[in-house]
Amino acid sequence: MAQEAIHSAVGRRKTSVAKVRLASGSGDILVNKKALDKYFSRESLRIELKRPLEVTKTIGTLNVYASVRGGGSTGQASAVKHGIARALVEMDPALRGALRKAGLLTRDPRMKERKKYGQKGARARFQFSKR
């Protein structure tokens, strides 16, 4: 078997962590050993995940293998997107400018705010009773 160049990176979003590998191929995208349309049922998530490939015009030329854990479907899709963008830069540093301009290399820092003591939630309070 011929050794082909495989580039890998880690992408994160909320509590999701995705390990992404890129290899030259026909454009197959597998997430946790399932086809993209089987793993992510929402079309919007599939479109978001493919964005780094569209920005760099590499869609259909690379196979994407992603292993993702934690969080929900939106966080997982964004984590895979982040991992693809990072792997593309590892593969070809010249793509960094286009990916940076599209905002695909920045890790989304938004996380769930912790519940506070003496309160119902992060911001929600227990109902106040005057008497």
Image (spheres, rainbow, N blue to C red):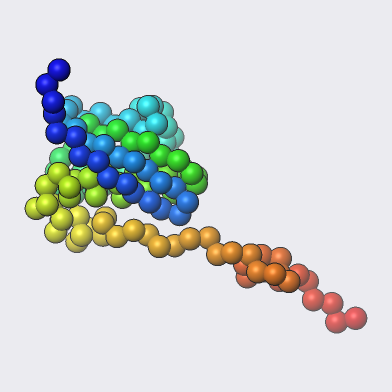
Horizontal and vertical percent position of residue 113: 55, 64
Looking at the image, which is closer to me, 59 or 65? Answer: 65
Q: Quadrant of residue 32?
A: top left
At 85% from the left and 82% from the top, the residue drawn is 130
Q: Answer above or below: position of 119 versus 98.
A: below
Q: Quadrant of residue 100?
A: bottom left
Horizontal and vertical percent position of residue 128: 79, 76
The N terminus appears in which quarter of the rendering?
A: top left
Looking at the image, which is closer to me, 68 or 75? Answer: 68
Horizontal and vertical percent position of residue 82: 31, 50
Q: Answer above or below: position of 124 versus 130.
A: above
Horizontal side of 32 relative to 118 (left or right) equals: left
Q: Residue furthest left?
A: 94
Q: Is residue 69 visible?
A: yes
At 25% from the left and 28% from the top, the residue drawn is 28
The C terminus appears in which quarter of the rendering?
A: bottom right
Horizontal side of 5 relative to 11 (left or right) equals: left
Q: Is residue 74 visible?
A: no
Q: Residue furthest top?
A: 1
Horizontal side of 84 relative to 109 (left or right) equals: left
At 19% from the left and 61% from the top, the residue drawn is 101
Horizontal and vertical percent position of residue 40: 42, 36
Q: Answer above or below: position of 35 versus 94.
A: above
Horizontal side of 94 relative to 124 (left or right) equals: left
At 44% from the left and 35% from the top, the residue drawn is 41
